[in-house]
Image (cartoon, grey):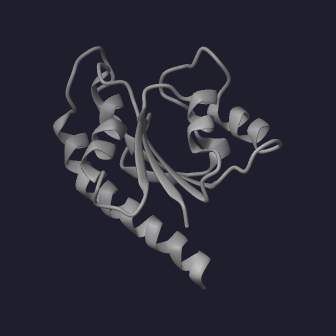
Amino acid sequence: MHSIVVGVGNPIMGDDAVGLEIARRIKGRVNADVKMAVAGGLELAEMIAEYDVAIIVDAFHGEGIEEMEVDEYEETVPNHDISFPSAYHILSRYVKMPRVRILGIGMKDFRLKEGLSKEVAAAIPEAMKRIEKILEEENELVIG
């Protein structure tokens, strides 16, 4: 199984950087490619093309840690191109697109600043466990 974990975020928008931080911490700890993306939309969809499974980790306007479907996913910062769900569906007509699991981390502080709030930083270990569990589940689907 060829998997990718993509941490999405903006490093200068407070808690929006949580996906980037999780990708940085989990790299080398999971049996998957790990990348960081500052952009969403078409660029993110192209990044995950040809994989079997993609886990996208991003901040969302809400609380806690939540798994969501592709069509429920909204990037926190608007893109200059099309949305990720639209890009995913369009590309799936032409290239192999993976099963996508999106893990959202609720934001507390979304403003121009570097660094995460204490609440969001405290959610990182649990989010990393969830990523590891998702990869195990997906691997079992392939084997079983």
Give the camera-side residue of 48 and 81: 48
Quarter of the image with the C terminus is: bottom right
Quarter of the image with the N terminus is: bottom right
Residue drawn at (67%, 37%) of the image:
85
Residue drawn at (19%, 48%) of the image:
122
Give the camera-side residue of 17 and 34: 34
Q: Position of residue 60 (x, y in %)?
A: 44, 36
Task: Identify the image quadrant of residue 78.
Answer: top right
Vertical arrangement, residue 84 with respect to residue 129, above or below:
above
Q: Position of residue 143 (x, y in %)?
A: 58, 82
Q: Position of residue 36 (x, y in %)?
A: 40, 36
Q: Is residue 139 left or right of residue 18?
A: right
Residue drawn at (25%, 41%) of the image:
120
Task: Identify the image quadrant of residue 12.
Answer: top left
Vertical arrangement, residue 142 with respect to residue 21, above or below:
below
Residue drawn at (81%, 41%) of the image:
94
Callout count: 0
Q: Is residue 126 left or right of residue 141?
A: left
Vertical arrangement, residue 98 with respect to residue 85, above or below:
below
In the picture as drawn, the residue positioned furthest to the bottom comes out as 144
Q: Position of residue 52 (x, y in %)?
A: 61, 59
In the picture as drawn, the residue positioned furthest to the left comes out as 118
